[in-house]
Amino acid sequence: MADPMKIRAQLQGDIADVKVLMFHPMETGLRKDPITGDVIPLHFIQRVVATHNGKTMLDAQWSQAVSKNPFVNFRIRGAKPGDKVTVSWEDNMGEKASIETTLN
Amino acid sequence: MRTQKPLGQASRRKVLRALALGSAYITSFAAGWLRPVQLLAAEWNKAAFDAKVLADALKGIGATSVADSNQILLKAPEIAENGAIVPVEITSRIPGTQTIYIIADKNPQPLVAIFDIAGGMEPFISTRIKMGESSKVRILVKAGGKFYVATQEVKVTIGGCGG
């Protein structure tokens, strides 16, 4: 399986600008398979959590209306080189992924 | 073979008391056990996300009274050629911003996302959403237990939900 997500964090002064890309179909449950005509089941990331040195900074709940291969950008204050930023997600089928980066 | 002595009045009471204590113990244990889990992470708000109309979505997140605010900056395209990818960027200037909500009024389920942010975060979120048709994008901010809103009309050329 390809990497389930990518992260890029840049320090701007003491603010960490974090950009995350998650590879996920984000199926709405409304689309039909173009060949079989069967409805493609609802399959989407429900929860995204970001931590800074282990402390939860962002706790997001999503619907199926976040775009396919979701992108999210957020900013953490009081960040410094060497700090760790982790982002993890879980979807409605129980699949999970997580990624960590160290600020520099 | 020994015959079993029937339970006397006193010992039956003992058994009943033990049972009552046991169930009380189990109940308090379960309650105490569930509480920290809810503190760690609020349950995915099914009622609000499943809501088919705006009013029910607002009710689901507890936004019964919402004040217009020019302190919520919303950057979204006026015309989105592809409803499957509508970039939305939010900056809140409301002190004590705790939660940012993204709502697309006319989506089959209007509530798109909820972002709870800790005190150590800039009140800023940028993401991409799907829109089924042209409608208002509504950003709610919860700060100090109150709700504030900013809206922008986004015209969608090709819807991004079915297809």
Image (cartoon, coloured by chain):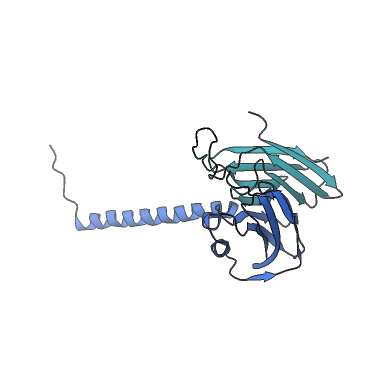
Chain colours: A cyan, B blue
Image quadrant where residue A53 sits: top right
Q: Is residue B21 above or below residue A85?
A: below
Q: Nearer the viewer, residue A33 or A100?
A: A33
Q: Quadrant of the N terminus of chain B?
A: top left
**Toward the viewer: B32 or A21?**
A21
In the picture as drawn, the residue positioned furthest to the top comes out as A1
Residue B51, percent from left and from top: 53, 58
In percent of the image, x 71 and y 51: which residue is there? B80
Position of B24 with respect to A49 (left or right) is left
Is B130 on the left or on the right of A103, as rendered?
left
> Residue A102: image x %, image y %?
77, 39
Q: Is residue A26 left or right of residue A7?
A: left
Residue B144 seen in this snapshot: no
B148 or A14, which is in the foreground?
Answer: B148
**Quadrant housing residue B153:** bottom right
| Above or below, B150 relative to A89 | below
Nearest to the observer: residue A27 or residue A71: A27
